[in-house]
């Protein structure tokens, strides 16, 4: 089209220029004719007029032609420029431009005609102009892309079709310029799409390739395909797809048929072989490719590596299995199972599980995988303890606090020799399990057929973490179970029945004692279980606690005939619901014992009453006796004495000496009898005297008593020696009698001494007992008779030697005993005596 | 002449009566003694009943009263007398062998005027009785209404 226009235009311009030239010549001729042939002018006027008319007609034709041409020139989508070319090939100012050129470059026609191609070229392209012009001159016609610039500097891409033509003998250039901004934009967009597609294919983490209908690789084999499948693009282009393993050939043929029928394959899992021979599972997507006629010419295939997905899935399933396993197996079994799972998932041949103590230094070897124990390792046992510092390279992960892989175990410089029986290690991965900042365990796997990598670490970490969770849970559960068992054993062993009752009378728990006593509850309600009743017991004390919320304690006669001390109290179940805790202690024996004691006490009381009555009777008898002694014995004595006196008066002169002696003897005996009776009565009174206890200063009392004896002892040489005596609690009158008796004795039995020495003192003694002694240098006594001294009417001397009835010391003992004290004596014949009494 | 001051001796034991009278006779007081052999007889005398219903009016200046007697003992007699407005002013001296505290306490509680234990020794007995007789029969001014 542009070429056609150019030719036409060229033709038109040429015609016009010829006409103009002709016109000019005609004018010249005319002027010459006018000047030279003025005369002829008039003659020729007519002819001239004709010629003028002719010329005007031609000019009109020309004008019309030009108009037509200009219309053509100004219409259309291309800007048109005409400019001359110098002999040196330099473009001159435009001599013709069309309206579109003006509009597009935002100049008026006049302005634009002042410019040359250089001024409307993009500045950076201006220097290319000579080169373009040279090529134009050489080739005569060129088509090239360029950039033009508007008056205000806006650049836009153009495609220029330029041709050289001769005008008036000089070369001119006709340049037809098309704005290709839109086309450029489309091209750029397309380029970007292609670029994106290419980058996508390059970067896609999935293998992408295309196949022809026969299954040959056509042209596409992206980097991921190279990486995942192992073959380079050059190796497979034009080749049959080499990744289909023998066992999958049939399936592959199926895929091809499917494709040929125009269907897509969406996410089929299939095993493919890498170049290194390893088999990997992929998920395959494929879509047919069509030619312009809609025939299937092949397909695009996308393979995604689902190893990771499978691994995660496998881990997930292993986790589920382990969790389930843990419910019904011991901790030990669980660890083995965890190791077996990890071993299977990582393709390892050995596995170990060590606990690391909180000190982060002590490892306890907890477990080996089944495989390891069966096939490879007999060296170690459970529960062995290692110091991390002395362990082999397998504890590097503890030092480094992260998973460690040794794929080249044999070349490790810091490895230690294996113990005998230990599995030979080719490569290993050891992963620490963390809880907070502490490593709680390490799990090791070894001897995978290929190198260990991050996937293995992931597997070991995930399942290791899980197993440790379970370890912790198990440990807690085992601790709880142990605690529970312990508590249960305690409950079972309790020599009391313990039961839990629900508000609806169910027996939630009954301990062994309970069951032994009342049988198995077997889901029966308590009233049925314990009493064989059909409804709850009236006034059941146990269920009161549900309302009162305060413990109830009572004694209860059970249906088994035993008496129980019951304690009911409200407790709450783990869900907060109320329960009654009933505890019953069999107190039958205690009750019987108590009953016996009560009976015995009653009997005893009865016996005491009886005995007291007997004693009172005896006492009354004694008193009656004493009374009668005092009356009845004294009366005859008095009579004897009286009548003897009267007899003596009457016969004073008639009797001889002998008779008088007899009378005197009768008198003496009578008097002695009287004294004996009086003493006996006083001794009897001593036992019945109502004591009035208060503090008694013994020193004061002793001085008083000594003074009382002064009249009797006048003329005697007596050396008193009285030590410091305590203040004691007692009956003053009775204690006075004690001192009177003892001092009187001392005085009596020292009578033969030229100088009597009487010492009264207090023995140093442990509180709260005070021991008082009275020592004399009198006639003393034989210790043989010491026991007799304190008996009633016991005497160690003849009455002629020392007077007395022998009641004194008996009274002393009786008084001291009544004060809760003791009496004793020491002495030796002729060497004095010491009498002691103690007072609490 | 002074009215005769009588002393009532209540005593069941003949030997004691004899010895008492013997003792009193040494001071010529024996004739003033009226003897009753037990409590019943003593009250008969005092209330002028039975065999004493004809005796002259007037209460004895003192009563010497033994405790242990048949029929009615000394304590009963004492209780009776001290409860009687007419009799309660008559001085009563217990003359007994008993030194029992319960007798002593009972007698004083009933309002006895004196309590004398008969000494075993006759000489002392004589002395005691004599002093009692002299005191009550001669020295003491009897309450109104005495013989």
Image (tube, coloured by chain):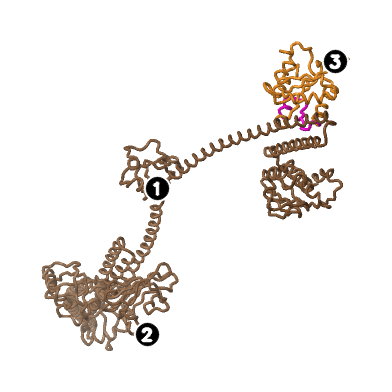
Residue displayed at 72% across by 20% down: B37
The alpha-carbon separation of the residues under discs 1 and 3 comes to 101 Å
In the image, which is nearer the foreground, mark 1 or mark 3?
3
Give a yes or no on whether discs 2 and 1 share a subunit: yes
Task: Name the residue: 85% across, 48% down.
Answer: A716
* Mark 2 to mark 3 CA distance (whole Å): 157 Å
Q: Which residues are magenta?
A: B105-123
Q: Residues within 10 Å of mark 1 (few under 14, many from 20)?
A: many
The question of residue B115 being in magenta is answered with: yes
Residue located beneath label 3 in the image: B3
Q: Secondary structure at mark 2?
A: loop
For residue A605, side relative to residue B118 (left or right): left
Subunit ID for the residue under disc 3: B
Q: Residue furthest top?
A: B54
Q: Residue furthest right?
A: B1
The colour applied to the residues of chain B in this rendering is orange
The residue labelled by disc 1 is A497
Residue A530, given in percent of the width and then of the height, sits at 35, 42
**Which residue is at the front of the view, A382 or A783?**
A783
Q: CA distance from mark 2 to mark 1?
A: 69 Å
Residue underneath mark 2: A413
Give the label, 2 or 3, closer to the camera.
3
Q: Is residue A428 magenta?
A: no
Give the chain ID for the brown colour. Answer: A
Quarter of image, res A730? top right
Task: Between residue A632 and residue A271, name the one nearer to us.
Answer: A632
Query: Which percent across, then down, holds residue A214?
Result: 11, 75
B46 in relation to A29, above or below: above
The answer to whether marks 2 and 3 mark residues whose Cβ atoms lie closer than 8 Å is no
Nearest to N terminus: mark 2 or mark 1 = 2
Residue A589 coordinates in the image, percent (x, y) = 44, 45
Secondary structure at numbered mark 3: loop
């Amino acid at each position: 089209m542009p070429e056609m226009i150019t030719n036409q235009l060229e033709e038109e311009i040429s015609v016009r220029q010829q006409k103009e030239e002709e016109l000019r010549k005609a004018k010249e001729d005319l002027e010459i004719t006018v000047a030279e042939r003025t005369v002829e002018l008039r003659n020729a006027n007519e002819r001239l007029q004709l010629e003028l008319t002719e010329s005007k007609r031609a000019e009109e034709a020309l004008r019309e032609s030009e108009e037509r041409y200009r219309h053509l020139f100004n219409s259309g989508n291309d800007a048109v420029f005409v400019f001359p070319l110098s002999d040196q090939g330099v473009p001159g100012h435009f001599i013709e431009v069309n309206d579109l050129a003006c509009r597009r470059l935002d100049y008026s026609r006049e302005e634009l005609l002042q410019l040359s191609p250089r001024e409307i070229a993009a500045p950076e392209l201006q220097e290319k102009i000579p080169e373009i012009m040279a090529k134009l001159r050489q080739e005569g016609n060129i088509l090239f892309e360029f950039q033009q610039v508007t008056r205000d500097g806006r650049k836009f891409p153009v495609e220029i079709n330029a041709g050289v033509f001769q005008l008036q003998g000089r070369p001119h250039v006709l340049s037809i310029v098309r704005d290709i901004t839109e086309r450029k934009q489309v091209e750029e967009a397309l380029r970007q799409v292609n670029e994106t597609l290419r980058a996508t294919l390059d970067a896609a983490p999935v293998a992408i390739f295309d196949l022809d209908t026969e299954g040959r690789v056509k042209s596409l084999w992206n980097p991921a395909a190279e990486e995942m499948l192992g073959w380079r693009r050059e190796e497979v282009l034009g080749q049959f797809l080499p990744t289909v393993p023998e066992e999958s050939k049939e399936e592959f043929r199926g895929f091809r048929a499917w494709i040929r029928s125009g269907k897509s394959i969406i996410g089929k899992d299939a095993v493919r072989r890498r170049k290194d021979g390893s088999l990997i599972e992929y998920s395959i997507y494929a879509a047919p490719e069509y030619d312009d006629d809609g025939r299937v010419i092949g397909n695009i295939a996308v393979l995604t590596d689902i190893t990771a997905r499978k691994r995660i899935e496998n881990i997930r399933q292993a986790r589920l299995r382990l969790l389930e396993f843990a419910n019904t197996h011991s901790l030990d079994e669980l660890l083995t199972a965890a190791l077996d799972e990890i071993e299977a998932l990582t393709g390892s041949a050995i596995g170990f599980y060590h606990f690391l103590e909180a000190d982060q230094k002590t490892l306890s070897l907890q477990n080996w995988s089944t495989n390891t124990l069966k096939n490879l390792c007999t060296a170690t046992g459970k529960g062995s303890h290692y110091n991390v510092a002395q362990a082999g390279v397998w504890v590097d992960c503890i030092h480094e606090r992260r998973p460690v892989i040794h794929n080249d175990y044999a070349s490790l410089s810091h490895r230690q020799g294996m113990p005998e029986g230990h599995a030979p290690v080719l490569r290993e991965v050891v992963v620490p399990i963390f809880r907070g900042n502490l490593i709680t365990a390490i799990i090791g796997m070894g001897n995978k057929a290929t190198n260990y990598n991050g996937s293995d670490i992931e597997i070991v970490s995930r399942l290791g973490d899980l197993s440790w969770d379970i370890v912790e849970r198990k440990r807690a559960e085992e601790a709880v179970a142990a605690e529970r068992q312990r508590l249960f054993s305690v409950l079972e062993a309790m020599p009391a029945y313990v039961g839990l009752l629900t508000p609806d009378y169910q027996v939630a728990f009954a301990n062994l004692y309970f069951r032994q006593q009342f049988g198995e509850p077997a889901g029966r309600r308590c009233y049925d279980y314990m009493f064989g009743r059909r409804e709850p017991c009236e006034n059941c004390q146990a269920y009161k606690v549900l309302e009162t919320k305060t413990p109830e304690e009572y004694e209860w006669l059970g249906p088994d005939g035993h008496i129980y001390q019951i304690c009911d109290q409200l407790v709450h179940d783990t869900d907060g619901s109320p329960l009654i805790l009933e505890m019953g202690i069999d107190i039958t024996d205690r009750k019987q014992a108590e009953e016996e004691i009560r009976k015995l006490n009653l009997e005893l009381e009865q016996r005491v009453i009886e005995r007291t009555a007997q004693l009172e009777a005896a006492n009354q008898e004694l008193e009656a006796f004493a009374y009668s002694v005092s009356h009845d014995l004294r009366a005859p004595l008095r009579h004897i004495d009286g009548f003897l006196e009267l007899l003596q008066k009457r016969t004073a002169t008639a009797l001889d000496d002998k008779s008088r002696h007899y009378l005197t003897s009768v008198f003496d005996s009578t008097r002695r009898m009287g004294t004996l009776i009086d003493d006996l009565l006083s001794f009897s009174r001593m036992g019945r005297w109502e004591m009035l206890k208060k503090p008694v200063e013994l020193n004061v009392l002793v001085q008083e008593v000594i003074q009382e004896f002064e009249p009797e002892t006048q003329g005697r040489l007596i050396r008193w020696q009285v030590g410091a005596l305590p203040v004691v609690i007692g009956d003053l009158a009775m204690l006075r009698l004690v001192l009177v008796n003892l001092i009187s004795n001392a005085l009596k039995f020292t009578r033969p001494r030229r100088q009597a020495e009487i010492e009264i003192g207090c023995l140093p003694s442990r509180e709260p007992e005070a021991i008082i002694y009275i020592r004399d240098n009198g006639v003393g006594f034989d210790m043989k008779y010491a026991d007799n001294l304190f008996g009633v009417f016991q005497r160690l001397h003849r009455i002629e030697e020392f007077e007395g009835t022998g009641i004194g010391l008996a009274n002393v003992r009786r008084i001291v005993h009544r004060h809760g004290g003791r009496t004793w004596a020491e002495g030796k014949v002729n060497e004095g005596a010491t009498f002691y009494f103690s007072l609490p | 002449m002074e009215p005769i001051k009588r002393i009532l001796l209540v005593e069941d034991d003949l030997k004691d009566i004899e010895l008492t009278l013997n003792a009193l006779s040494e001071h010529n007081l024996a004739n003033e003694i009226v003897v009753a052999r037990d409590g019943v007889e003593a009250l008969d005398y005092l209330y002028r009943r039975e065999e004493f219903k004809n005796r002259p009016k007037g209460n004895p200046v003192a009563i010497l009263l033994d405790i242990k007697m048949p029929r009615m003992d000394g304590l009963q007699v004492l209780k009776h007398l001290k409860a009687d407005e007419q009799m309660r002013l008559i001085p009563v001296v217990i003359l007994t062998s008993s030194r029992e505290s319960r007798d002593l306490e009972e007698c004083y509680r009933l309002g006895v005027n004196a309590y004398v234990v008969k000494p075993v020794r006759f000489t002392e007995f004589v002395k005691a009785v004599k002093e009692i007789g002299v005191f009550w029969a001669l020295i003491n001014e009897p309450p109104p209404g005495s013989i």
